Image (cartoon, helix red, strand yellow):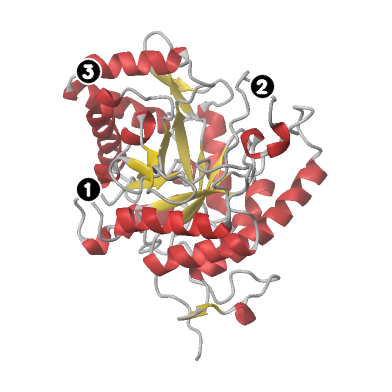
Amino acid sequence: MSSVVPTQRIRLSIWVGATDLDEKVVAGAAGIVDDLTLIFTIANDETTNRIGYEIMMTADRGAREAAACHKFGVQCLAGFQLTGSGVKKGPRTQRFESFLKTASNDQIDAFAKEMVAKLDEPTTKGPRTPTQRFDGLGFDNESVSDVSLRDKLTRLYRAVATELVKGDGSGGRFVSVAAGPLSSPTQTVLPCPEAPGGGKAEGFVLNHPYEMSAGLPNLVVRPMCYDTFSANPPTTAATRDRWHGEILDYAVGKGIHNGNKPATRAAVFQMGFKNAPGFHNNPANAGKVDENGNKFQNLDGIVDAGTEMEAVCWHMRQHGVGVVLFAFPPRGDAKTKQPKPEKQYLAELAEYYKKIARYNFALNGAATSDGPDWTRFDAANPTKDTRSPGTADAPAQAPIGADGQKRLGKP
């Protein structure tokens, strides 16, 4: 059986934390990654709720990072994040929830316009060039847990998605929303041997229903499919695979409730996978507390690096569903809290991109009906025999369009 290169590309994205994206850092993503989604870019003020840039971000830096990504054909999304440390909500989350509780639809729509305007704010040298513009906005509002705000949150996301594509040169821009894993409208996990009663969806997870994307092709839902089972005893790859299948079944299969036609369900969906274990994923930290004072939570659901992640990408490909990874390697050293020497960091990135190239091949490379044709994978030329990014009709999730090509610097 001969293998073939797919005619449509599936989106492969990476969430990026506190890392300065310069050209040396982004270069390895060329041809294998569709977008890098920044987690920290803009924020609401703690008192007035006005939108501004994060402490470490400015309009100039945002424009510089977008341009660095675009030089290598990679889209760059700005980020709006509200997450807390443990149960206590921070002042920005409290202010945001307070605003939504009393906000009218017009006020929410105005807030969405303010967000988009901030993304397009001129630099100190003047208006942004097309290559300096962000390709969209990613949300990660994990500390917004008041379920009475669900409909207003949905309206905000939809209003931003609508606003993003208004105006000259704005086509192809999109919203991504970090959501929780749902195997049904009310459960994160269906009853199984590892969780006899299943997993009850609460707060943040309930606040981000998959149907928020109904009728909007530029609103992509990205559930974080990790940190759900136990690290000790360890969760098996078979358990993770079954769970991913439950989520797929609900989101794009027979259990879908998002109002989209069957042919478009996968086009507004990317499943998020974590292959960089954190403090709460390491059983050696049992009995310890993290830097925010939170006790070890014994969490798993993480996809191990290597062949398991490649198999996951093939699983997603069979359903036409995109993949987003957490997270891009940080510049800072976890122990010293200081930036790593550039030579060391770039060497680590080179190894990371080797893995990403294989994930991309599993998603977008030559394959038979049985799986990727690894005989056609060329580590020295990882874009060979793959459906490349950058065309106006790609990827399947939020195609970039003609305006998106201009932002990437293509004529």
- Mark 2 / mark 3, whichever is N-terminal: 3
Name which residue type carries label 2.
Glu
- Mark 1 / mark 2, whichever is N-terminal: 1
Q: Is residue 399 visible?
A: no
- Binning the other alpha carbons within 10 Å of mark 3 as few (below 14), some (14 to 19) or many (20 upward) gives some
Q: Are marks 1 and 3 in contact (CB under 8 Å)?
A: no
**Image coords of residue 314 (percent x, y):** 49, 67
State the separation of the CA atoms marked 1 and 2: 39 Å
Seen at 46% across and 27% down, the residue is: 42
Q: Is residue 220 visible?
A: yes
Q: Quadrant of residue 393?
A: bottom left
Callout 3 secondary element: loop
The residue positioned farthest toward the bottom in the image shown: 1
User: In terms of depth relative to the viewer, which is nearer, 319 or 249?
Assistant: 249
Name which residue type carries label 3.
Ala
User: Could you tell whether 46 is left or right of 345 in the image?
Assistant: left
> Where, quadrant-wise, is the C terminus in this rendering?
bottom left
Callout 1 secondary element: loop
- Binning the other alpha carbons within 10 Å of mark 1 as few (below 14), some (14 to 19) or many (20 upward) gives some
User: Could you tell whether 45 is left or right of 260 in the image?
Assistant: right
Q: What residue does disc 3 label?
A: 103
User: In terms of depth relative to the viewer, which is nearer, 27 or 108?
Assistant: 108
Residue depth check, mark 1 versus mark 2: number of the one nearer the observer: 2
Seen at 57% across and 32% down, the residue is: 61
Q: What residue does disc 2 label?
A: 291
